[in-house]
Image: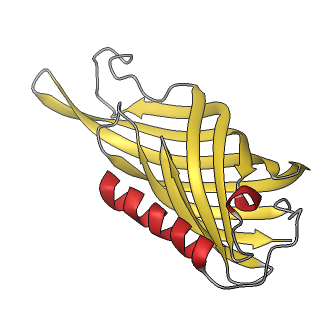
Amino acid sequence: MKKITYTLLALLIVAGLTASAQERAYPEKFGKTLNLGLGLGYYGYVGHPLPVFHADFEFDVVRNFTLAPFINFYSYRNRYNHQDNYYYYYETVIPIGVKATYYFDELLNANNKWDFYLAGSLGFAIRNSHWDDGYDGDPDNYHGANPLYIDLHIGSEYHFNNKLGAFLDLSTGVSTIGLAVHF
């Protein structure tokens, strides 16, 4: 899976650098962008990928650098055997924080249809968890999401026009694909 992901990212970068388009007018503004995405997150304590919803809104800070308040949402359940009975543990997690993004378009001399970036997210996770009714074991037996949320990203956006684009964001926790709406 990682090989496919890296190959796809490499193809996106090559396509962005070699596609013919007008030269980019610098400095480009990346902010005032609403990013909405769906993706997969893998968390070791769950043991399998989970569908995740992501939303953020970027603001320009300095040339090629943005900050974006974000919110993610995922929910899951795991089965647990306690005294020969099966019970489910349920958890809903809502990470909230800030994503800092640096764009490499100018450095890579990318055309105006493409954006390339590295980013980091920092925040906290709001958790709601509970066991099935009737579970009489240790309620702390299952340890869910860490309250500190940290994620590293590499990504690309293709602009359909000045107002709408599609992005691919690969990360250490939640990888998403989605739409970018520019205001």
Asked whether, in this view, residue 124 is left or right of residue 136, the answer is right
The answer to whether any part of residue 1 appears in the image is: no
Instruction: Please tell me which residue lies in front, 43 or 82.
Output: 43
Q: Quadrant of the N terminus?
A: bottom left
Q: Residue 124: x, y in percent?
A: 64, 30
The answer to whether any part of residue 110 appears in the image is: yes
Q: Name the residue at the left extreme.
A: 84
Up-down: is 130 above or below 6?
Answer: above
Asked whether, in this view, residue 90 is left or right of residue 29, the answer is left
Up-down: is 82 above or below 95?
Answer: above
Instruction: Please tell me which residue lies in front, 94 or 67.
Output: 67
Asked whether, in this view, residue 104 is left or right of residue 25, the answer is left
Q: Residue 127: x, y in percent?
A: 55, 32
Up-down: is 72 above or below 82?
Answer: below
Residue 140, quarter of the rendered image: top left
Q: Residue at x 84, y 59 (%)?
A: 31
Q: How many marks?
A: 0
Q: Quadrant of the C terminus?
A: bottom right
Instruction: Please tell me which residue lies in front, 91 or 107.
Output: 107
Q: Residue at x 60, y 48 (%)?
A: 72
Q: Residue 120: x, y in percent?
A: 65, 39
Asked whether, in this view, residue 80 is left or right of residue 102, the answer is left
Q: Residue 94: x, y in percent?
A: 59, 41
Q: Residue at x 48, y 30 (%)?
A: 145
